[in-house]
Amino acid sequence: MTSPTLAQRLACRELPAGPAVMRQRWSRILFLHWRVDPAALRAQLPRGLHLDLHQGDAWLGIVPFEMARVRPRLLPPLPGLSWFPELNVRTYVHDDHGVPGVWFHSLDCSQAIAVELARRLFHLPYQHARMKVLQTKDGIRYQCQRRGETEVAAYQYQPRGSARIAEPGSLEFFLAERYLLYSAKPDGRIFSGRVHHAPYLLSPAVCDAWSTLPARWDQLPAPIEPPESVLWVGRVDVRVYPLRPA
C-alpha cells in the first residue's frame, strides 16, 4: 500500500483522455468536515481501498449543494430533470498504488430518475430524499429528509470572505480538490470515475445551522461538535468521464 504523493494529487486535476459522458454544474456548495476516528470509517471501506489521511487524521464530510444543467454530453439540459439539490456524505481514500479519491457513504437526491441512473451506471449509493433549498436574506436554507427517515437535516449558510484556490498540501486542498471517485459493486469489484473542472475558488463560510443526521443515517459516527472546516464554492462547471475498473 502506497500513500498518495503531492504529485499524484495534482495529477488528478489534469484533463482525462477521451470524451466526457456527462456535463453538470455544481453550485452553492457547502463543504462541512469533521475529524473522526479512522477505525469507524475504515470498517466501511471495500477491500482494495484505504483511508487517505491528512497529517494522520481521517475526515468525514457532509456536502449539500445544487446540481444544474445535468445532461449527457451531446444533449441539452431538460427542465424538471436537469436541476435538483443533492447532499453527500463522504470520506477520502486511495487505492493500493496511492491514487487518491472520494468514497461516498451516501448521496441524497430529490430527482428520482437521477437516483436510479446513478445507482445503475455509477454503482453509487444514491438515496431518495425530499429536499428544499431557499435563498433568504440570512443565506441559504437547505433541508434534506431521506426516504424512510422522520427527522430533517437542516442547514443555513453563506460565504464570508474572499475566494481563492487552495494551496497544494493544505488541509483545504486535501478536503476539496478531489477529481476521482471510487465505487463498488455488491460482488466487491471496485470502479473509479474521473471528473474535470477548474480548481475550486474556495471561500470561508458561516454555517448558522448544521446537522450530522445524514452520517447517522449511514451508521457512521455523528459528531456533536461544530464542523472544524466550513468552506463554500459558488459554482463550477464539470465534465464527468466513464467509470473504469479500478
Image (spheres, rainbow, N blue to C red):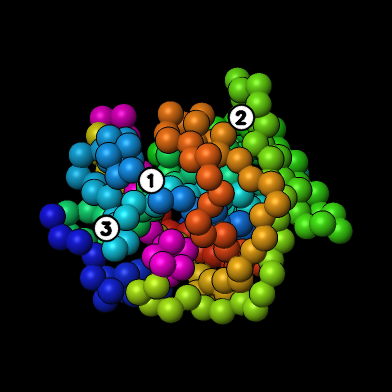
- Nearer-N-terminus badge (1/3): 1
Q: Mark number for residue 225?
A: none
Other-residue count near label 2 (Cα within 10 Å), few / some / many at <14 / 14–19 / ≥20: many
- Percent across and percent down for residue 90 are 44, 47
- In the picture, measured across the screen, residue 46 lies left or right of residue 112, that is left
Q: Are marks 1 and 3 in contact (CB under 8 Å)?
A: no
> How far apart, in angstroms, are the residues tagged by discs 1 and 2?
23 Å
- Percent across and percent down for residue 243 are 37, 51
Q: Residue at x 49, y 40 (%)?
A: 223
Q: Which quarter of the rendered picture does the N terminus lie within?
A: bottom left
In the image, the segment drawn in magenta is 171-187
Q: Is residue 31 visible?
A: yes
Taking the view exactly as shown, the residue that stands out farthest to the left is: 1
Asked if the magenta segment contains residue 182, the reply would be yes
Q: Is residue 19 visible?
A: no
Taking the view exactly as shown, the residue that stands out farthest to the right is: 137
Q: Quadrant of residue 167?
A: bottom left
Asked if the magenta segment contains residue 129, the reply would be no
Q: Quadrant of residue 201?
A: bottom right
> How far apart, in angstroms, are the residues tagged by discs 1 and 3?
11 Å
SS for callout 3: loop
Q: Residue at x 32, y 70 (%)?
A: 9
- Percent across and percent down for residue 172 are 46, 68
Badge 1 amino acid: Val
- Percent across and percent down for residue 246 are 25, 51
* Comparing labels 2 and 3, the label whose residue is closer to the camera: 3
Which residue in the protein does label 2 denote? 146
Q: Mark number for residue 36?
A: 1
